[in-house]
Amino acid sequence: MTQAGIRLLAPAKINLFLAVKGLRADGYHDLATVMHQVSLCDVVQIKIDEKPGIRLITTNPELADDEGNLAYRAAALFMKKAGLEQGVDIFIEKHIPLGAGLAGGSADAAAVIKGLNLIMGAPFNDKDLLAIAEMLGSDVPFCLYGGTVLAWGRGELLSPIAAAGEPHFVLVKPPFSLSTADVYSTWDKRGERCYPPVTDMVEALGRGDWRKVGASLYNSLETVAAGQHHEIPEIKARLLSLGAEGALMSGSGPTVFGVFRGYTDAKQAYLELLRDYTECFLVSSYRPEGRE
Ligand code: C5P
């Protein structure tokens, strides 16, 4: 018998700034990154059932429906930490492309722990939930927190940024995926060791100056991935020629996004790129409920 259910949006993120500072003893890399949620969302439905176990269904047949899926592991970890024995049924309507640098898997996992906490009567406070998120992956704490943040450490230490303005973004995912671990290990061999200060980006966001945001975009991993995949600089050049204030690869790639101040220019660029790329999206900023 089904007892309770919830439906949540799981928004994708883009990295407006990503400086890789160095390899740590634990195998992760120290970062300074600005992450920004956008309105490209998966839809996550969760139901509690008396029949024990976790059952996951997604609309993308390429995705694992067991421990190989981060959302599944998120549900298992939450129930274990809470000492709960009921079953969990999860249905994920996938819209965020896989292996894209948009944190789709992390967004789903964050939605699962947020949703379970709501359905189960809040066994955890915000701090406990962030600790669970951190155990699941470097991007999961941000996906749980949401909005726009400056993150450091391996990505789990978060400081919110009040980002003003109403920008538009065109996201283009070339027809291949990249492994985050592979991109970071290539950075170890030949990545850029110098990076600009993050302060220009943070100030521009605070002022809602999206021209300056466009000029301050930076990603240490972009040259690493672009050196192996010519589509990345090609998409970037096209976005800029179509009027973007700036364009950048997101996270460990390969998705490239362009920042636009006006909707008309963004829409025109989107329609142009859609002719050549199936996975092309016109999105805006996503603001979590209750936040400006
Ligand atoms: O934390 P997560 O499981 O998402 O990370 C996937 C992989 O990305 C790690 O195994 C690691 O190779 C790389 N990574 C890293 N430094 C980070 C985040 C991720 O090296 N700050």
Image: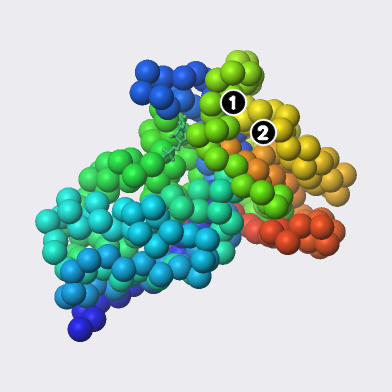
- Splitting the image into 4 quarters, where does residue 196 fall? top right
Q: Is residue 263 above or below residue 197?
A: below
Mark 1 element type: helix
Q: Which residue is mark 1?
A: 186
* Residue 41 shows in the view: no
Q: Secondary structure at mark 2?
A: helix
Say which amino acid is labelled 1.
Thr
The numbered mark, 1 or 2, whose residue comes first in the sequence reads: 1
Q: Position of residue 254 (x, y in %)?
A: 65, 43
Taking depth in this image into account, of 203 and 197 the one nearest to the observer is 197
Q: Residue sitting at 55 percent across and 33 percent down?
A: 182
Q: Amino acid at mark 2?
A: Ala
Give the residue at x 46% y 25%: 29
Q: Is residue 220 above or below residue 179?
A: above
**Lateral position of residue 167 relative to residue 7, left or right:** right
Identify the residue at horizontal 17%, vertical 53% (top origin). 80
The quarter in which the N terminus is drawn is bottom left
Q: Position of residue 237 (x, y in %)?
A: 83, 40
1 and 2 marks in contact (CB < 8 Å): yes
Please name whichever residue, 290 or 197, is drawn nearer the observer in this view of the structure. Answer: 197
* Neighbourhood count class around disc 2 (C-alpha, 10 Å): few under 14, some 14–19, many 20 upward: many
Looking at the image, residue 232 lies above or below residue 87: above
Q: Which residue does the image show at 42% across and 27% down from the upper left?
A: 28
Please indicate, yes or no, whether residue 3 appears anywhere in the rendered image. Answer: yes
Give the residue number, with chain letter if any, for mark 2.
225
Question: Residue 34: which quarter of the image?
Answer: top right
Query: Looking at the image, which is closer to me, 75 or 52?
Result: 52
Between 234 and 145, which is closer to the camera in this rendering? 234
Tell me where residue 267 sits by quadrant.
Answer: bottom right
